[in-house]
Amino acid sequence: MLLKLLNKEKIYMESAKAGSIYILSNSFLSMKKNKSLKKSQEEKSKIRIKVRSYDHRVIDTALKTIIDAINQTGAKIIGPIFLPVDKTVYTVLRSTFVHKDAREQFERRIHRRLIDILNFTPETLEVLRTLKLPAGVDIEIKM
């Protein structure tokens, strides 16, 4: 059973089963539509760059070259954002057959960073394509 009461700006709907009240306003709905349009336009004009490396010094030099190149094109940069380090530990027996208590541990750390580029131009895309980066850096670019 639904009961509807109309006011000038607000519509109140009360449900007997759920016992909840929904308040909807025409101005609120129009504001919500405008916000969703702005968000969709911003999402379309955004480039996300994920950078990964085993060495934190190499990743920092790569980020510096990326940021300097993008700043020359006039695009807005958000970041670099430090993401958690992936740490994997491997335990290996030192001996092949006996001495199980003698073990060695090796670890691998993957350092990750994130950069968002807003309001980019075709010049920004060309700079990203022709960028020279140090060896040992993995880059993933999403639009």
Image (spheres, grey):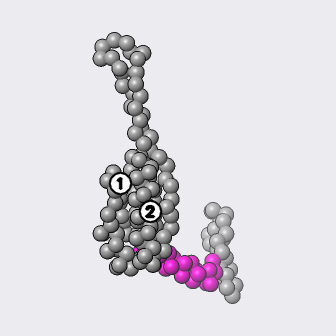
Question: Mark 1 falls on what kind of element?
Answer: strand
Rendered residue at 40%/32% (across/down): 106
Residue 39 position (above or below residue 101): below
Q: Amino acid at mark 1?
A: Val
The residue furthest bottom is: 8
Q: Residues within 10 Å of mark 1 (few under 14, many from 20)?
A: some
Rendered residue at 30%/69% (across/down): 130
Return the residue nearer the eye: 42 or 60.
Answer: 60
Tell me the residue that label 2 is attached to: 64
Q: Which residues are magenta?
A: 24-46
- Image quadrant holding the C terminus, namely bottom left
Rendered residue at 44%/51% (across/down): 57
Rendered residue at 40%/52% (across/down): 58
- Does the magenta-highlighted stretch encompass residue 31? yes
Q: CA distance from mark 2 to mark 1?
A: 13 Å
User: Residue 104: percent from the left, percent from the top?
Assistant: 40, 25
- Does the magenta-highlighted stretch encompass residue 50? no
Return the residue nearer the eye: 39 or 25.
Answer: 39
User: Residue 74: percent from the left, percent from the top?
Assistant: 45, 78
Which callout, 2 or 1, points at the residue further toward the start of the chain?
A: 2
Tell me the residue that label 1 is attached to: 137
Q: Quadrant of residue 16?
A: bottom right
**In the image, 43: left or right of 18?**
left
- Residue 78 in view here: yes
User: Residue 134: percent from the left, percent from the top?
Assistant: 34, 56
Q: Quadrant of residue 32?
A: bottom right
Q: Amino acid at mark 2?
A: Lys
Question: Mark 2 falls on what kind of element?
Answer: helix
